[in-house]
Image (tube, rainbow, N blue to C red):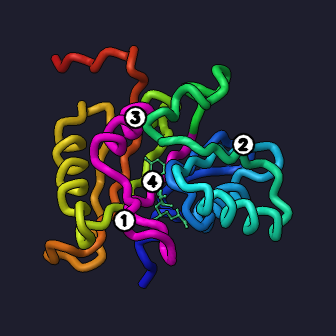
Amino acid sequence: MLSLTEQAHQLCGAASGDIVIDATAGNGHDTLFLAQRVGPLGQVYAFDIQESALKSTATRLTAAGMTNVRLIHDDHAHMRKWIEPQHRGCVSTVMFNLGYLPRGDKSIVTKSSSTLAAIDDAISLLHVGGRLTILAYPGHSGGFEETTAVERTVAAFPPSLLVKWYSGHVGERFSPKLLLVEKTQSDETPTPVAG
Ligand SMILES: C[S@@+](CC[C@H](N)C(=O)[O-])C[C@H]1O[C@@H](n2cnc3c(N)ncnc32)[C@H](O)[C@@H]1O
C-alpha cells in the first residue's frame, strides 16, 4: 500500500511545463518530486520559514541537477505576492505537507492561521482543473487543532471546489490525513442554475 506522501504525489496531477508550488519545502522530497515532474519547461516555487529546511532542499535539488525551483524564505501565508503576476491563476498544483521538519526543531510547526490563509491564496492561484494536496498530522502538539480547522474550512467550500479526504488508518482520530481539492470552475464562472 502506498504511503500518504506517495498518494499525494500520485494525486497532484503536475505535468511537464507546469507552474507548481510546494508550500512547505522541509527536506525537499516533495520539491524534488515536483521539479522532476514539471521538468525544465516548468517552474516550482517552494516556501519554508526555516533557513535549515531551504538549505536541505537546495542540497537535494543540486544533487539531482534541478534548476527550475525558486526557494523562498517566507511564511506561505504570503504566497501570492511571490508568484509572478503571469503565473497567478496558472498554477496546476500546490502541495502542503504540514507539521514539523523531520529531524529538525519539533517546536516549529505549521499553524492553522497561516495554513488557512495560505490555502486561500493557493486556491486563488490555481487554474481550473488545478489541484491542492494537504497532508495533515493531527498527532503532534497543535496538529489536531490545525487539522480540525482545515476540515471545517474545506467543509464550507463552494461546489466549484471538489474535496476528497484520504486517511492512513480509517477511523483513527490521530492518524495522518490527506486532502485533495480540485478547482472545477473559475471564481468568475457562475454556477449553472438547474431547470
Ligand atoms: C512536514 S515538513 C515538510 C516536508 C517536506 N514537504 C518534505 O518533502 O520534506 C513541514 C515544513 O513546514 C515548514 N513550515 C512551518 N510553518 C510554515 C509556514 N508558515 N510557511 C512555510 N513553511 C512552514 C516547516 O519549517 C517544515 O520544514
Which amino acid type is marked by label 4? Answer: Phe
Which residue is drawn at the image coordinates 16% and 45% (left, top)? 152
Q: CA distance from mark 3 to mark 2?
A: 23 Å
Instruction: Give the residue number, with chain letter if any, for mark 2.
Output: 43
Which amino acid type is marked by label 2? Answer: Gln
Q: Nearer the viewer, residue 53 or 160?
A: 53
Which amino acid type is marked by label 1? Answer: Ser
Which residue is drawn at the image coordinates 51% and 48% (left, top)? 23
Q: Is residue 168 left or right of residue 24?
A: left
Across and down, in percent, residue 88 comes to: 58, 25
Instruction: Give the residue number, with chain letter if any, for mark 4.
Output: 96
Instruction: Give the residue number, with chain letter if any, for mark 3.
Output: 184
Whether residues under marks 4 and 3 lie with C-beta atoms below 8 angstroms apart, the answer is: no
Q: CA distance from mark 2 to mark 1?
A: 31 Å
Neighbourhood count class around disc 1 (C-alpha, 10 Å): few under 14, some 14–19, many 20 upward: few
Which amino acid type is marked by label 3? Answer: Thr
Whether residues under marks 3 and 2 lie with C-beta atoms below 8 angstroms apart, the answer is: no
Q: Which residues are magenta?
A: 92-121
Q: Was residue 113 drawn as part of the magenta stretch in this picture?
A: yes
Neighbourhood count class around disc 2 (C-alpha, 10 Å): few under 14, some 14–19, many 20 upward: many
Image quarter hosting the N terminus: bottom left
Image quarter hosting the C terminus: top left
Neighbourhood count class around disc 4 (C-alpha, 10 Å): few under 14, some 14–19, many 20 upward: many
At mark 1, the secondary structure is loop
At mark 3, the secondary structure is loop
Q: Earlier in the sequence, mark 4 or mark 2?
A: 2
